[in-house]
Image: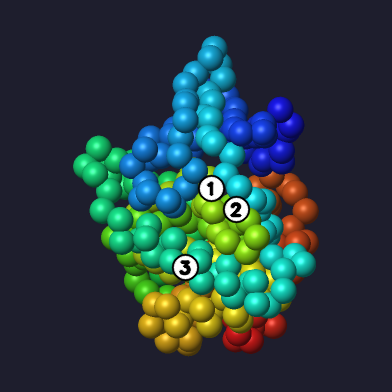
Amino acid sequence: MVAAPGKSHQVYLGPDVVVKILAAGHSRLDREIALAHHLPTGLAAPLLASGQHGQVRYACYPRVPGTTPGMWLPGVDATTARHLTEQAVERLTMLHKWTPPDDVRHILSEALDHGGFIGQAALFAEIDRVSGHGVLRREVVGGLMAIARGAPPLARTDVPVHADCHWGNWMAHQGTVTALLDFEWARFGEPIDDWYFLARFSGEHMATAVDVITGATGIPHDELRAACEVREAAYLVSDLLVELARSGDPAELVGALHELVIDRVWGKV
C-alpha cells in the first residue's frame, strides 16, 4: 500500500481499498464510521470494515474510481468545472434532503468546535478577541464588524451537512463525480455551510460555482454571497485566534482576511 497525504490521519492506498489509520479515541473518525452505513446510497464510498487494534483505530473503504480534483480545481477547464459542480450540488442536495435514522441523529447533533459560523453574537465576540492582538489593520476589523452586523442571530441546524466539502474531498473520474469523502465533520447545519466550501475552493471557477448553486437552489446571488462571506469571516477569525494562541505565523490568515474584507472577494462573483 502507498501512503497518501492526510492532515489528521494516515491514509494508505491499495489497488482496491483505502485504509485510514489514527490513534484510538479520535472522535471525528468515530463519527465518520458511525455514519457510513446510514448515508444515502451513492453519496460516499461504503465502509468495508472498521475497528481498533491496540491503540490504533482504522476504517477501510473500497477505492472508488478516479482522483480528487484538488483544492482550487487546479488545471480544470471551465466546462469541466461547471459539470463537476453541477454533480457535486446534486450529491449535496441528496445529503441535505436525507432524513437520518434516530440512532445517528444524536451524532449529527453533537456540538463541534468546527470554527464556523454559529451566531452573530459569537462572531462579534471572536472579532473583538482577535482585534485585541493588534495584527489586523483598523479597516479590516471595521469590515469584519460590518459583515457580522449583516449576519443572522443564529445559524440554523436543521439539515445534515458535510461541512468540509472542498474539492480535496471529492473524487472524480473522466469528468464524473464518483464520491464525496471524509465525513468527519458532518453535523446538523444548513445548506449554505456546504455551498460555502464548494464555491470558495473552486479557484478561478468560483463565479461558475456560485452560478451553478444559485441556479440549482433558487438562492439569490446576493443572498448566497452574503451568507458565504459571513462563514468565511467566522472560519478565518477562528483560525487566526488558534494560530495566535500557539504563537504561529499569522501572515497567511491576515492576508486572507484582507482579501475578504478589503478586496471583497465575494463581491466579485
The CA span between labels 3 and 2 is: 14 Å
Per the image, the residue denoted by label 1 is 181
Specify the amino acid type for callout 2: Met
Say whether disc 1 or disc 3 marks the residue closer to the N-terminus: 3
Label 2: which residue? 171
Label 1 – label 3 distance at C-alpha: 15 Å
Q: How would you rate the neighbour count of disc 2 (Cα within 10 Å): few for under 14, some for 14-19, many for 20 or more?
A: many
Report the residue at 65% width, 77% height from top.
79
Residue 11 is drawn in which quadrant? top right
State the CA–CA distance, disc 2 to disc 1.
Answer: 8 Å
- Please say if the residues under marks 2 and 1 sit with CB atoms less than 8 Å apart: yes
- Way the structure is coloured: rainbow
User: Residue 31's spot in the image, x, y percent?
Assistant: 42, 38
Question: In the figure, residue 56 lies in which quadrant?
Answer: top right
Q: Is residue 237 visible?
A: no
Horizontal placement of 248 versus 37: left or right? right
Q: Image quadrant for the C terminus?
A: bottom right
**Residue 58 in the image, given as x and y percentages of width and height:** 54, 26
Residue displayed at 38% across by 83% down:
218
User: Which label belongs to residue 241?
Assistant: none
Mark 3 packing: few (<14 Cα in 10 Å), some, or many (20+)? some
Around disc 1, counting alpha carbons within 10 Å, would you say few (fewer than 14), some (14 to 19), or many (20 or more)?
Answer: some
Q: Secondary structure at mark 3?
A: helix
Give the labeled residue for mark 3: 89
Left or right of residue 168: residue 229: left
